[in-house]
Amino acid sequence: MLEVQTISKRYGETIALQNASIAFRAGTIHTILGENGSGKSTLVKLLSGIVQPDSGTIRLDGHAFSGPNPASFQAAGFATVFQEVLIAPDRSVTDNILLGLDGLLKRAVPRGERRGRAAGILARFARTEVPLDRPAGLLPLAAQQLVVLARALARDPKILILDEVTAALDFADREAVFALMRNLAEEGRLILFITHRMDEVMALSDRISILRGGQVVRTEERGTSSPAELLRAMAPQTAAELAHA
Ligand SMILES: Nc1ncnc2c1ncn2[C@@H]1O[C@H](COP(=O)(O)OP(=O)(O)OP(=O)(O)O)[C@@H](O)[C@H]1O
Ligand SMILES: [Mg+2]
């Protein structure tokens, strides 16, 4: 469904991604696993059109993106929840959730339907009560995380990219988000799941790609490698130290 082909991206001297190639299948949860600084969020930003590759191609259903920018990725059915929680602090929770649907000048969802729409989206995965009328900036981080997730889901994405979104969530919300991810994959959507947590990787992934120093070490099906083997591929140094200890 989606192919990243020999993508490279530098920031000055730093090589964030080097010749990275990954093929993603519809109907899967595809995990990107890698240490801090291995290039995960750079890949996420490339697949959202907010960062441009120095070289390489992104293809969707066989067609290359010609003008990769946020609008073209949104139009193609991508929605991304970024690692940094991006909210409009003074706007209500409802407005923040519907932000992805609203135009710059015009609200897409009429006034009388807005609360109900926002509540319906949250109800699909939020177990914690999120107050719809409060300014989103006043909420705790975990609730803000639920709001940005709801914003991505509001667009009914074909490809949902989640960059470390579960870090701040409590157990019940996290489990509910995982259940929703499975449902969305079963409906034929692609979920790109970025996480550090090996338990989440083993529980959720259909396929796993490992990034190390900006390079794709490998992509494999779930169950191919043990957690210890994945750790070795992702961080040989850390794995060796752990084994020694
Ligand atoms: N805007 C930027 N300017 C300069 N360097 C950057 C920029 N964004 C990322 N980098 C560098 O590129 C490399 C890859 O960063 P990236 O954020 O993609 O890693 P990551 O795998 O998401 O890490 P983390 O697990 O900490 O979120 C790092 O060395 C990082 O410091
Ligand atoms: Mg990151």
Image (cartoon, helix red, strand yellow):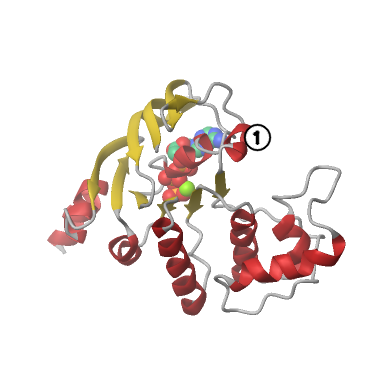
Q: Nearer the viewer, residue 148 or 191?
A: 191
Tally the numbered discs.
Answer: 1
Residue 9 appears anywhere in the view: no
Rendered position, 190 above or below 8 = below
User: Circle 1 — which element?
Assistant: helix
Q: Look at 47% across and 71% down and name the residue there.
A: 174
Q: Is residue 95 left or right of residue 169?
A: right
Q: Quadrant of the N terminus?
A: top left
State the residue position of label 1: 71
> Residue at (70%, 56%) from the top-left corner?
87
| Quadrant housing the C terminus | bottom left
Q: Amino acid at mark 1?
A: Ala
Residue 53 to residue 186: above or below: above
Q: Is residue 107 left or right of residue 176?
A: right
- Residue 42, how many percent across, how many down? 48, 38
Question: What residue sits 80% from the left and 65% below the top?
Answer: 113
Q: Is mark 1 within 8 Å of ligand 1?
A: no
Side (left or right) of 37 relative to 110:
left
